[in-house]
Image: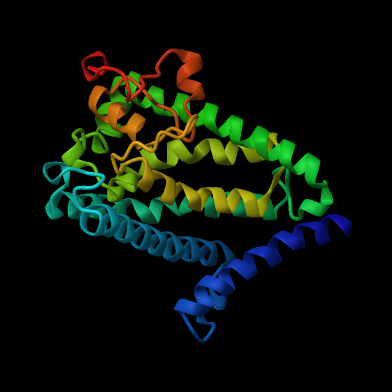
Amino acid sequence: MEGADYLHRFVEEADWYNGIVLDALLPGGSWKRLPRPLQSWLRNYLGGTILYFVSGFLWCFYIYHWKRNVYVPKDAIPSNKAMLLQILVAMKAMPWYCALPTLSEYMVERGWTRCFSSITEVGWPAYIAYATLYMVFVEFGIYWMHRKLHDIKPLYKYLHATHHIYNKQNTLSPFAGLAFHPLDGILQAVPHVIALFLIPTQLTTHVLLLFVEAVWTANIHDCIHGKVWPVMGAGYHTIHHTTYRHNYGHYTIWMDWMFGTLRDPEEDPKKAE
């Protein structure tokens, strides 16, 4: 009974997320008649789509219009056509992206993972240690998944090349952050889910980090070098899009530094080539 009560906390938490998103967008509670996995998927799809468009449009308005020529030279601003193409690619993939957090939520609710519901269950010191370990694992996993998507030719040709058509500064924009082949995007997010089976993780932290991906990927495709060590900012990621063999990391530069693939944006551009 205690185990059932414990798992019910995850169900209640998911219901709370559903209420926030679905009640606001689908008033009347009609969504409550849907199967639970479909409720989760619909919430993730609507929430993810809204986050993608709001963050993308605000980001583009700020750097291309409000601060025009301050951060990005006029000749480096992507065309509306290029950004529309990125949006179309991302929207085709979005329904599939949302299947991954839906699956992880399903597994958590059935007790198959090492997730816990509240920080009070483990205490703040343990939570911070677990969260740090989770992030290190995710950094390691995404680095190698991303690198293999380049190294294994069929994976690059049929999956990752969809994203790498944006290989110049004037073709990259915040909207390119989710413009992947659906399977490519899912593969790069899989380390988040694998971590749930290995590392005690608070469910809310896991869900928030999955949605932070949308904002983070917008940031690293805006071509503005933030110069905040050790963050893998847009300056590093722009080099990745132009050389194809450097800066595979996600949030930080540490994995590239450890495995010899780091290229600093401050270095001579000829060396990067």
Give the position of the N terminus as an image quadrant: bottom right
Q: Give how far across and how far down residue 270 sits, in percent.
A: 21, 15
Q: Residue at x 79, y 40 (%)?
A: 126
Residue 204: image location, x then y, percent:
64, 55
Is 136 left or right of 123, judged from the image as shown?
left
- Is 263 situated above or below 100? above
How far across and how far down the image is residue 176, in percent?
28, 46
- Say if 195 sits above or below 43 in the image: above
Q: Is residue 273 above or below residue 4?
A: above
Above or below — where is 194 with respect to 119? above
Query: Quadrant of residue 60 in the image?
Result: bottom left
Colouring mode (rainbow / by chain / secondary structure / one colour):
rainbow
Residue in the image at 20% along x and 53% along y: 68
Question: Could you say which quadrant of the image residue 162 lies in?
Answer: top left
Q: Nearer the viewer, residue 164 or 169?
A: 169
Say which residue appears at 16% left-offset and 49% top-offset: 82
- Extreme-right residue of the structure: 1
